[in-house]
Image: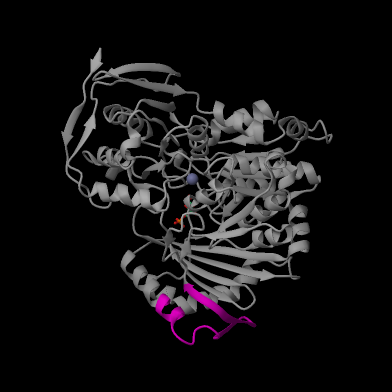
């Protein structure tokens, strides 16, 4: 039977502008008539002539509205000349898994249905993100084009009669107006598990995790926070690496994440932190809703900052078979991320890049063979095995480092700091502020820090004094395609390398979230308490930005 394509009239919605990582809005916004349809049509159109006859990957983190959106995408893609879709069973695919599938299947791209770490459920967030053929988030030029198209959309195409059951693995073929169209519902985890087995030495890790090589099993608590990683974690840690069932928790993906805020940090992964603090564990880890973020803690909940995590993995990269085989190219971090990895890069003689916030900025460098490991303070760590950050990969990397050194996480860090010094780091988030005063605050601060005489000025607090060496609104020129990203965050760099960074989040779905990042380097005083060490610089940042005055907030909502 041949199914026919219908053209449906529509009108544009305002604000369909992808942010740091795709379009994120409340579910209620996405479920307005034609809202999702418009955005999907424009996302497909942004591919131009390449779309006809292409293969696309579709899947998401299992949050509320994922399944409906996936089914809708099948009907719209079919109508737009796409030849084949690979859809995760029940619409489930982690973000790293999508990236891997795009690359492995040489697909044109993938549509990722996620709002990442934002809460899910009918009252909360949904998101749609397009990843390109390298497996990475679409670059700015592409997402700007999507946005441009959404402002003028008049109609979208749909094969209304196309019904497919995405709860069952299998292949369905259709005839759409004389052209073949195939939907393959795939096992959500198989391809990703294959990839991890290629990267890490699973036999060695299994002996380590199960205790065969050490005499005692590794005590882990891996918390999937009811997000998408549950199925992946069970297969990898339980089935392949032989960990005990109690090592994994919250492994059933739930549409509302069971009410959890699936963001792996000290505030939202509270249950993990408290359990590991009280119990007898060697490692604790958590992931976000779509599985690209990670948090690592050691015994007694010893916290590893994402910036340190990146630096430690960089130091031990050659303990991982993938890097033994493919070599170690450069490293990179986002601008607000503490510069611990820079020191490792310097020691190893590697290029180190500083890019704007957003994983998409790493892609070109990886494709050009200049970058193999990167990370962000926002709990993202990953490598050039895919073009997304990868939470489970990060945990496997850490377990590999533990196996390789035979040391505890705390001792690994202490040894690292004794070699390189320590970058104390914290981030203060002020969530759901009013947008207007925040924009005003940023504009005022930009004026202040770029005014003549600001460089060279000294600020003192709590017995410490800092002299400004450089201050600007960060802009970045991509070394590969020379594209320029401006206004990526205000930064003040002091003579001793300490930094204050302030920017507005690009991943929220409403209002404004102010992020204040504090990075302070100490060569010798490496065993202090971060909150104490950073207090003087925080006070200086609040004074320069006048944040309390503009936002009406006296304290952040989240500290990471
Ligand atoms: C997502 C992106 C990251 C980014 C993070 C925070 O996870 O993939 O690249 O660092 O969001 O972005 P934001 O704009 O909210 O600070
Ligand atoms: Zn995420």
Residue closest to the far top: 1
Q: Which residues are magenta?
A: 445-472
Residue 198 higher or lower than 18, as above or below: above
Q: Nearer the viewer, residue 305 or 450?
A: 450
Image location (x, y in percent) of residue 451: 43, 83
Q: Is residue 350 left or right of residue 254?
A: right
Q: Image point 83% across, 33% down: which residue?
A: 213
The percent coordinates of residue 342 (x first, y second) are 65, 61
Residue at 66% x, 40% y is 396
- Is residue 16 among the parts visible in the rendering? no
The colour scheme is one colour
Query: What residue appears at the point 47 percent right and 79 percent down from the top-left corner?
Result: 544
Per the image, is 297 magenta? no
| Number of numbered labels in the structure image | 0
Is 522 displayed left or right of 121 in the figure?
Answer: right
Q: Is residue 329 left or right of residue 180?
A: right
Q: Relative to 354, say whether 452 is above or below.
A: below
Residue beneath the point at 39% across and 76% down: 549
Q: Return the x and y of residue 290 as percentages of the image width and height.
A: 48, 40
Residue 156 location, quadrant: top left
Quadrant in which the C terminus appears: bottom right
The answer, for residue 8, to whether it is visible in the render is yes
Residue 458 falls within the magenta-colored stretch:
yes
Dividing the picture into quarters, in which one does residue 532 lie? bottom right
| Residue 345: percent from left, percent from top | 68, 58
Q: Quadrant of the N terminus?
A: top left
Q: Nearer the viewer, residue 121 or 356?
A: 356
């Amino acid at each position: 039977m041949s199914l026919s394509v219908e053209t449906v009239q529509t009108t544009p919605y305002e604000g369909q502008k992808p942010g740091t990582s795709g379009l994120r809005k409340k579910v209620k916004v996405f479920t307005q008539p034609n809202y999702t349809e418009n955005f999907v049509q424009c996302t497909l159109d942004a591919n131009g002539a390449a779309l006809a006859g292409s293969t696309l990957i579709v899947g998401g983190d299992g949050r509320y509205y994922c399944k409906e959106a996936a089914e809708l995408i099948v009907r719209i893609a079919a109508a737009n000349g796409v030849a084949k879709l690979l859809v995760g069973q029940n619409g489930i695919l982690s973000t790293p898994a999508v990236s891997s599938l795009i690359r492995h299947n040489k697909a044109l791209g993938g549509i990722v249905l996620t709002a990442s770490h934002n809460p899910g459920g009918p009252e909360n967030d949904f998101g749609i993100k397009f990843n390109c053929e390298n497996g990475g988030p679409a670059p700015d030029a592409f997402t700007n084009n999507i946005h441009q198209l959404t402002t003028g959309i008049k109609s979208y195409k749909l094969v209304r009669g196309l019904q497919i059951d995405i709860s069952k693995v299998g292949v369905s073929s259709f005839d759409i107006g004389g052209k073949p169209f195939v939907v393959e519902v795939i096992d959500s985890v198989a391809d990703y598990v294959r990839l991890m087995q290629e990267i890490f030495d699973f036999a060695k890790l299994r002996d380590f995790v199960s205790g065969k090589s050490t005499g005692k099993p590794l005590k882990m608590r891996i918390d999937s926070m009811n997000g998408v990683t549950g199925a992946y974690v069970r297969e990898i840690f339980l089935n392949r690496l032989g960990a005990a069932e109690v090592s994994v928790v919250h492994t059933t993906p739930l549409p509302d994440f069971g009410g959890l805020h699936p963001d792996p940090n000290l505030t939202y992964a509270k249950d993990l932190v408290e359990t590991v603090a009280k119990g007898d564990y060697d490692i604790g880890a958590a992931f976000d809703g779509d599985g690209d973020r990670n948090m690592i803690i050691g015994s007694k909940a010893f916290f590893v900052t994402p910036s340190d995590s990146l630096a430690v993995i960089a130091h031990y990269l050659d303990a991982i078979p993938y890097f033994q085989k493919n070599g170690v190219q450069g490293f990179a971090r986002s601008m607000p991320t503490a510069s611990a990895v820079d020191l490792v890069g310097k020691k190893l003689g590697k290029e180190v890049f500083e890019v704007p916030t957003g994983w998409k900025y790493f892609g070109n460098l990886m494709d050009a063979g200049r970058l193999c490991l990167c990370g962000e303070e926002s709990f993202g760590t990953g490598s050039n095995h895919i073009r997304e950050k990868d939470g489970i990969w990060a945990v496997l990397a850490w377990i590999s480092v533990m196996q390789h050194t035979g040391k505890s996480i705390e001792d690994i860090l202490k040894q690292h700091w004794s070699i390189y010094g320590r970058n104390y780091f914290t981030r203060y988030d002020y969530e759901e502020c009013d947008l207007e005063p925040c924009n005003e605050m940023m504009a005022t601060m930009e004026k202040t820090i770029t005014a003549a005489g600001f460089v060279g000025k000294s600020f003192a607090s709590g017995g410490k004094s800092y002299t400004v060496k450089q201050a600007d609104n960060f802009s970045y020129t991509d070394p590969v395609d020379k594209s320029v990203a401006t206004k990526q965050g205000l930064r003040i760099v002091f003579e001793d390398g300490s930094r204050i960074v302030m920017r507005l989040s690009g991943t929220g779905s409403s209002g404004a979230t102010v992020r204040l990042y504090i990075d302070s380097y100490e060569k010798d005083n490496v065993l202090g308490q971060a909150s104490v060490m950073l207090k003087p610089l925080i006070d200086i940042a609040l004074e320069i930005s006048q944040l309390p005055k503009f936002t009406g907030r006296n304290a952040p909502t989240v500290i990471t």
